[in-house]
Image (tube, grey):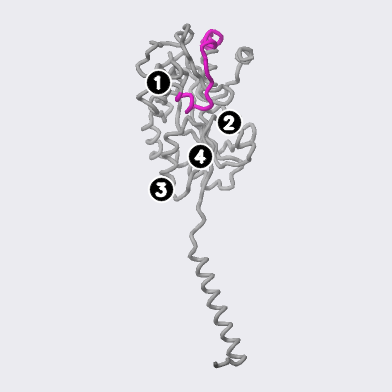
């Protein structure tokens, strides 16, 4: 066996280590880029079009959007406890006001994505012949609402009943408080109730099981909208801002319109010309007394 001299041995070691260095560095340079992701906490009032928008955004940018859905109040609480999330998208401005007040979102980044109109939603065919708010007080009518402490559409329900002077008379017919907008709509899909105070888009979510009864214009105290704002916990504000911009683009506005959402103030005003848009409503003492 041929034995290398000291000089040749050192040269061989240098060549081997150089080759290893090239392979290692080459492997690093060719490694896949770290996946880009953002996290959204959203009220489920926007779920169908938001899911579609998130997929379209990933296809266009490669950025994955992870969305947590639930009652807007519950989502806000989860963000505050975990101090995570890049974007907050509640189902109404009420919870955005709370988020801004608590320092959870940056007001300068807020954009309106779509508008929501509160209505009476009933089972398909309206078997109980419910035509007005007053009909919800009739004996035997089973009414469902979202939990007004954590769900936007539930908060609007109490506001509507209070404004109409019928909070106490309808309360006895309210048999359940759902945990989110999605679960509020599902009450009708499962025929668990005769009617709910819902959003106008619920019919488009499940047209085979849900019909809409519109309120009189003067019975609508406020028009809601779906806002999006960057969280103060975000460590990826550039991608978060890109997604919010995407939500307000013509492409995504068309997705919301396909799902029955109204995306212009002019159009939503046709249903309630004198209603306030946005703002905040606090549960009244009269409601607090009823639930005790």
Residue 177 quadrant? top right
Picture disc at residue 6: none
Q: Position of residue 219 (x, y in %)?
A: 47, 13
* Residue under pointer 3: 59
Q: Which residues are magenta?
A: 163-186
Between 100 and 140, which is closer to the camera in this rendering?
140
Q: Label 3, label 2: how many angstroms apart (C-alpha)? A: 30 Å
* Residue under pointer 1: 270
Q: Residues within 10 Å of mark 2 (few under 14, many from 20)?
A: many
Sequence-first disc among 3 and 2? 3
Q: Position of residue 163 (x, y in %)?
A: 53, 12
Sequence-first disc among 1 and 3? 3
Q: Is residue 124 left or right of 134 when viewed as pictured?
A: left
Q: Position of residue 101 (x, y in %)?
A: 63, 31
Q: Label 1, label 4: how many angstroms apart (C-alpha)? A: 32 Å
Q: Nearer the viewer, mark 3 or mark 2?
A: 2
Residue 109 appears in the picture as rendered: no
Above or below, comparing residue 45 to residue 216 in the picture: below
Q: Label 4, label 3: how many angstroms apart (C-alpha)? A: 16 Å
At mark 4, the secondary structure is strand
Q: Residue at x 48, y 65 (%)?
A: 30
């Amino acid at each position: 066996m041929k034995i290398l001299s000291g000089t040749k041995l050192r040269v061989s070691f240098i060549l081997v280590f150089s080759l290893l260095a090239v392979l290692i560095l080459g492997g690093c340079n060719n490694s896949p880029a770290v996946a880009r992701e953002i996290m959204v906490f959203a009220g489920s009032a926007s779920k169908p079009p938001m899911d579609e928008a998130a997929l379209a955004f990933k296809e266009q940018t490669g950025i994955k959007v992870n969305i947590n859905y639930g009652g807007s109040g519950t989502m806000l609480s989860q963000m505050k406890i975990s101090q995570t999330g890049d974007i907050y998208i509640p189902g109404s401005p009420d919870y955005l006001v709370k988020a801004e007040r608590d320092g959870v979102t940056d007001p300068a980044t807020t954009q309106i994505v779509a508008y929501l109109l509160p209505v009476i939603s009933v089972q398909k065919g309206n078997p109980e012949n419910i035509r007005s708010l007053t009909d919800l007080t009739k004996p035997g009518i089973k009414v469902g609402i979202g939990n007004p402490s954590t769900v936007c559409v539930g908060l609007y329900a109490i506001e509507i009943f209070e404004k109409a002077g019928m909070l106490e008379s309808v309360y006895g017919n309210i048999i359940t408080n759902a945990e989110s907008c999605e679960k509020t709509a599902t009450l009708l899909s499962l025929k668990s109730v005769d009617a709910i105070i819902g959003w106008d888009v619920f019919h488009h979510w499940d047209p085979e099981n849900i019909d809409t009864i519109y309120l009189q214009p003067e019975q609508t105290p406020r028009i809601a909208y779906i806002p999006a704002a960057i969280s103060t916990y975000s460590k990826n504000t550039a991608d978060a801002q890109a997604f919010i911009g995407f939500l307000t683009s013509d492409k995504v506005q068309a997705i919301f319109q396909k799902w029955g959402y109204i995306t212009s103030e002019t159009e939503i005003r046709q249903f309630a010309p004198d209603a306030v848009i946005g703002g905040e409503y606090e549960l009244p003492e009269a409601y607090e007394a009823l639930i005790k």
